[in-house]
Image: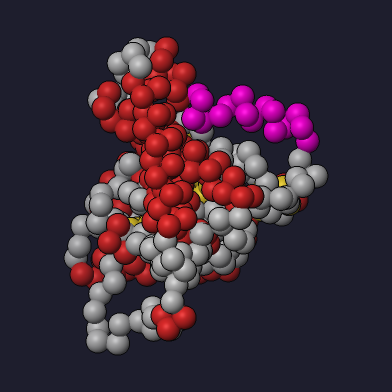
Amino acid sequence: MTQAPTNLLHLYRQMATIRQFELRAINERRSGLIPGFIHSCVGQEATAVGACAALNRDDVIASTHRGHGHLIAKGGEPKYMMAELAGRSDGYCGGKGGSLHLSDFDLGILGANGIVAGGIPMAAGAALAFQMRGEDRVALVFFGDGAVNEGAFHEAANLAGLWKLPVIFFCENNLYGEGTPQHKQTPIPDLSARAPGYGFPGVIVDGNDVLAVLETTRQAVARARAGGGPTFIEAKTYRQRGHYEGDPMIYRSQEEMEAWKQRDPVVGFRKWLEDSNTVEPGALDATDAEVQALLDDAVAFAAASPPPAPESALEGVYGDTHGGRVF
């Protein structure tokens, strides 16, 4: 697959931004700027970037409790994300959504979701709306391996297959549902094998290869736009950190973690770009420096933002009662 060098550099920049955002957020939580839990996606950058690169701006995504990378890949601004994590009024949700519930309808981000599989019926509903309006748009929903065992997945998959909805079910299979390995919660090795039972294809992709993820998602998007219905993409990947920051990770071996770190998606893509002479010398270092400056600004922006005013507590609680569209 051939990509223009500028596009490849953009993919690297997004992956580097996600990686550095997560590491910076972890540090800022330790410093006290960010309250609450952080569920980082370190190690899963290629899935977010590859999948979102196949979408148009007016296509929509639904995310998960591990959704920072999805939002950045869809065009989210790190400064508004950092402010939201810090519970500040200049955040995407006015400081009232936090890490688990980031959203931006203008970017087609229906929201991250603290409920396992909670975004799946939302994406199916959005896809149904697109179909009923005759719009050339698709919905893509990210979820983990544990979500495939939830009723919400099966109900949404059944109707999506029946009605041939333009939705892509994107499973980031990082091998663990919290601390439970996949083989102890599911009797099949490949979760994508469930898709044909609902009348649409399931495919497997190396979730640490951003170009493979991009190409696989492009094919699924093309199928959805052409009226062919859903695709289940199972991206085999790995989260390098715990389910949450502070997780002791006693359920994983050191050997397993080290083996997956050798397949680090950011390091691997950077090495491929360097070895293939695809980008100009120094471009990757310059990109890393730009990302670092971007995140310095994001932290400063969050720290300077005030907390939400008490009188704003009920703002955003109720939806539009006048029939307006939110996406």
| Image quadrant in which the N terminus is located | top left
| Region of the chain picked out in magenta, as a range | 253-268
Q: Nearer the viewer, residue 251 or 16?
A: 16
- The total of numbered circles placed on residues is 0
Residue at the (50%, 24%) spot, across then down: 268
| Image quadrant in which the C terminus is located | bottom left
Residue 188 to residue 213: above or below: below
On whether residue 247 falls in the magenta region, the answer is no
Direction bottom: furthest residue:
321
Residue at the (31%, 18%) spot, across then down: 279
Examine the rendering and report whether any part of residue 220 can be seen.
Answer: no
Q: Main secondary structure of the magenta part?
A: helix
On whether residue 254 falls in the magenta region, the answer is yes
Q: Position of residue 92 (x, y in %)?
A: 39, 62
Residue at the (43%, 42%) spot, across then down: 295
Q: Position of residue 183 (x, y in %)?
A: 72, 47
Q: Nearer the viewer, residue 75 or 204?
A: 75
Q: Nearer the viewer, residue 19 or 302?
A: 302
Direction front: furthest residue:
304
Asked whether, in this view, residue 61 is left or right of residue 265, the answer is left
Residue at the (44%, 23%) spot, across then down: 270
Q: Position of residue 98 (x, y in %)?
A: 51, 63
In the figure, residue 54 lies in which quadrant?
top left
Residue 188 to residue 151: above or below: above
